[in-house]
Amino acid sequence: MVERGQRLRALALALAAVGGFQCPATLQELSAKFWEWRARTQPFSTDDIPRLERPQGVRRSWSAASVAQMRTELAALRSCQRKRADGSVDARLLGSALSRVRWELDLNRRWRRDPTFYAEQALTPVLEALVKTPAVDEPELLSRLRNIPSLLDEARANLIDAVPAFAQLALASLQNIRGKLELLPVKDDSVAKAAEALEAFRDWLRERLPSMKGRASLGRAAYVDFLQGVALLPFAPEDLLALAKPEWERCVAAEALEQRRNQGAPALRLFVNIQEQIDAYVRDEGEVRAFLEERGVLTVPPSMGHYLVRPIPAYLDALGDFGEQDDFLGHDGVRFISPPSDQLGYFGRANARDPRPNLTHEGVPGHFFQLSLSRAHPDEVRRHYYDSGPNEGIGFYGGLPGAARADGCAHCACRGGLVRHQPGPGDLVPDRQAADPAAFGRGAAGAGREVLPAPLPRRALAERQRPALALARRADPPLRPEARGLLF
């Protein structure tokens, strides 16, 4: 009864506030109001594409009262959008952004189902404060640390449909969390209190894991709602599977052909040290920008900042489970990297040999470039991304053939003539071999000679498909045989 009374009081207050809400006169003004609201209420995400500048000192809450208020404010904003729904692209885009909020609150419902959601709400804000350059804002960092205990109290009240697999992921991410927080560049009792709250949440999850019964799958209807209402795609899930089939086959074939064509070529060496890697990024970014302009691919505005890499501090490296270690919200985009090593993860090893796949995917003309252009758009409605699907699509196809093992099968930059040195052999990381400059954009065989690729090895194709097929069989609920057939 007490909780119900609190909800009713919160609803009454929210309705009173909405009662005085005046709809802005234009879609652009409504969009500005919506994104100001989202900066205060949008869940923190490990994805860097939808990352927002947040108001200083904002304290997030997922209490029953806060969720009820968000729903009421969303209804008011939706009502205003419908009054301005003139069929224009701007009206549909704003409607999509509003639908995204409904998806988060009422369909995906991570705040009810997913313990990793609360690990992210606690620690992703900390990571986002740490990536700011040139210096960390200590008061803001402390404010975010002090928000952690109350968020985790709300998590215990909210996780009524917790999914056991998600709980296991949260437990894994919170191992040694105290040691990780003790690396932070601040000395304050809020660090110890945050660590204590996170450890208590971890213990609570471990204790309740055997009784968790939530289902990981949302079901087809919710997925259709996302595709049509948020992504604005005219496809059913089955259509996407059908579209994916030739893309998957093309990627697997392209990878096999690249490996066969470059058999016997010398592997790329690792950069000697991190400074050599930083210098290569600066050099190669300049070459990529010049190439895009000279070949008429696209214009890079003179005011556009640069995509830079910096050595990663230990305190930031420790929190890598909770977000992308970069900052694309400033004039320059900054990605933090580890020293070159064969012990790095897949992408780290690739970038420690050749920065260009990463530059074109994430720098220019990749994510940073797209986000910077959007923020400068004269139309307020079109300045924000709230889902990374379009950006990853552009990054996928804009990458280099060296990313045949990093991005899938992107060939556009190679076929356009950007890469003189083609990727060579390697199971995990892209390599390249020296080629005569006259063979610019042709292939590894030398100048003036086209190469007929060897036939695709059937065994290699089957080996590549096996992990995805196993994943499809384990899907919850399992994919129908005919759906699996679309994939493979």
Image (spheres, rainbow, N blue to C red):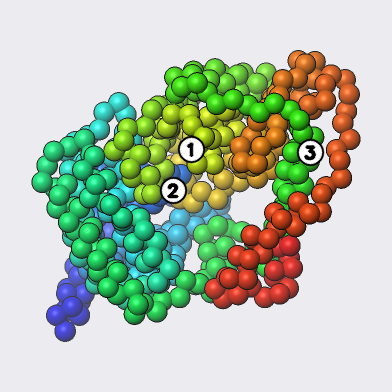
Q: Where 174 sits versus 439, above or below? A: below
Give the amino acid at mark 3: Arg
Q: Spatial distance from mark 3 to mark 2, Cα to Cα? A: 35 Å
Q: Where is residue 135 in the image (x, y as percent from the top left)?
A: 26, 28
**Image disc number at residue 47:** 2
Q: Residue at x 57, y 58 (%)?
A: 232
In this view, the mark in front (3 or 2): 3
Rate crowding at label 1 as few (under 14), some (14 to 19) or many (20 or more) other CA atoms within 10 Å.
few
Q: Which residue is drawn at 44% across and 23% down?
A: 274
Q: Earlier in the sequence, mark 3 or mark 2?
A: 2
In this view, the mark in front (3 or 1): 1
Q: Which of marks 2 and 1 is nearer the N terminus?
A: 2
* Residue 363 at least partly seen: no
Q: Where 395 sits versus 297, above or below? A: below
Would residue 299 be found to the left or right of residue 461 on screen? left
Return the residue nearer the eye: 293 or 108: 108
Residue with the mark numbered 3: 260
Q: Residue at x 34, y 80 (%)?
A: 211
Kindly check if marks 3 and 2 are in contact, taking CB atoms under 8 A apart as contact: no
Give the amino acid at mark 1: Gln
Q: Spatial distance from mark 3 to mark 1, Cα to Cα? A: 26 Å
Q: Spatial distance from mark 2 to mark 1, Cα to Cα? A: 24 Å
The residue tagged with tag 3: helix, strand or loop?
helix
Q: Position of residue 280 (x, y in %)?
A: 53, 20
Return the residue nearer the eye: 442 or 45: 442
Give the amino acid at mark 2: Asp
**Image disc number at residue 343:** 1
